[in-house]
Amino acid sequence: MQPSASRTYPLPLRRFLESIAQEHSRLSPRSGSSSIRRSKKSKRKPNGHPAPGQLSLALMGTVNIPTKTSPNPLRKRDQMSNFTDILNRPSEEIKPPVTLPMGSYHTVVMGLPEQGQSSKKKTDFLKFVHKIIAPLDDVDPDAITEFQQDGEMIAGQEIDNTFYITDKSANMLKEFLLNCGVSLEGRSMAEGLEDVPNAEVIIFIKHEASDDGKRTFAKVGSTAKIG
């Protein structure tokens, strides 16, 4: 007697295999179209906002500016070591920092400006950093000697120079760029910012008292061209 089909493939098993085949043929096309739909959804249109680390000024182009990066573990360890050294230092050695003397200085601009907002009015600003090359003749020699008496040199000191970006103060930023030797003819100020790093410029340092009147700070009052 020939073995029956049900004997070779038991009925429950045959139904199970048939259901798998039907399910596979039914789902295969949908799976493909579903993946296509997902891939289409994953493509997002740009939202028009500048990428992190870029300054976007209306009708003025886009300029890369520095952004904070993840902390360097070695630098963090050095900072912790410095922190410990300061706390362990004899209190008699702790003195108020000496203020840079008033007068004019030959400086170089360190990199692109940092972008931020004021804490009170939320006014946008650009903060440049000047590194002092040398004091000029109008700086009091006695003040220079006092500043450097503990081994701290004026050359190499850094000082911030902040410009608030408003309609009324925009000309101050323009004047600064021109004093840095930046050509603005046919260019926006945003485009001119690209030429500021390593520019040499004279700064005039003035003294400004703290709100409580207990401390005096050095601040950049104005700038001028070299030569």
Image: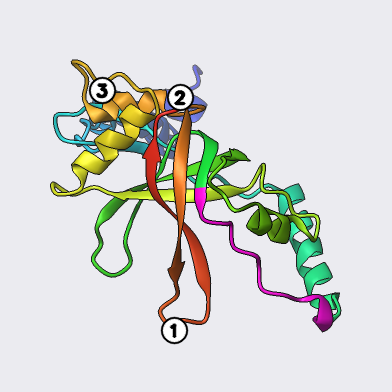
Overall secondary structure of the magenta section? loop
Is there any visible trace of residue 31 in the rendered image?
no
Of pointers 3 and 1, the one earlier in the residue sequence:
3
**Left or right placement of residue 139 versus residue 44 in this view:** right
Between 33 and 27, the one nearer to me in the picture: 33
Q: Secondary structure at mark 2?
A: loop
In terms of sequence position, does the residue under pointer 3 or pointer 2 come before the other? 3
- At x 56%, y 49%, the residue is 139
Q: Amino acid at mark 1?
A: Asp
In this orientation, does residue 197 appear?
yes
* Amino acid of disc 3: Pro
Query: In this rendering, is residue 154 above or below 45?
Result: below
Q: Are marks 1 and 2 in contact (CB under 8 Å)?
A: no
Q: CA distance from mark 3 to mark 1?
A: 75 Å
**90 to the left or right of 103:** right
Q: Is residue 144 magenta?
A: no
Kindly indicate the quadrant of the structure image that contains residue 90: bottom right
Q: Residues within 10 Å of mark 2 (few under 14, many from 20)?
A: few
Q: Are marks 3 and 1 in contact (CB under 8 Å)?
A: no
Q: Residue at x 54, y 36 (%)?
A: 106
Q: Secondary structure at mark 1?
A: loop
**What residue lies at 51% left-to-right and 18% top-to-bottom?**
1
Quadrant including the C terminus: top left
Q: Which residue is mark 1?
A: 212
Between tags 3 and 1, which lies in front?
A: 1
Q: Residue beneath label 2, please?
A: 227
Amino acid marked by disc 2: Gly
Residue marked by disc 3: 29
Question: Dot 3 surroundings within 10 Å: few (below 14), some, or many (20 or more)?
Answer: few
Element at label 3: helix
Magenta part of the protein: which range? 91-103
In which quadrant of the rendered view does residue 12 lie? top left
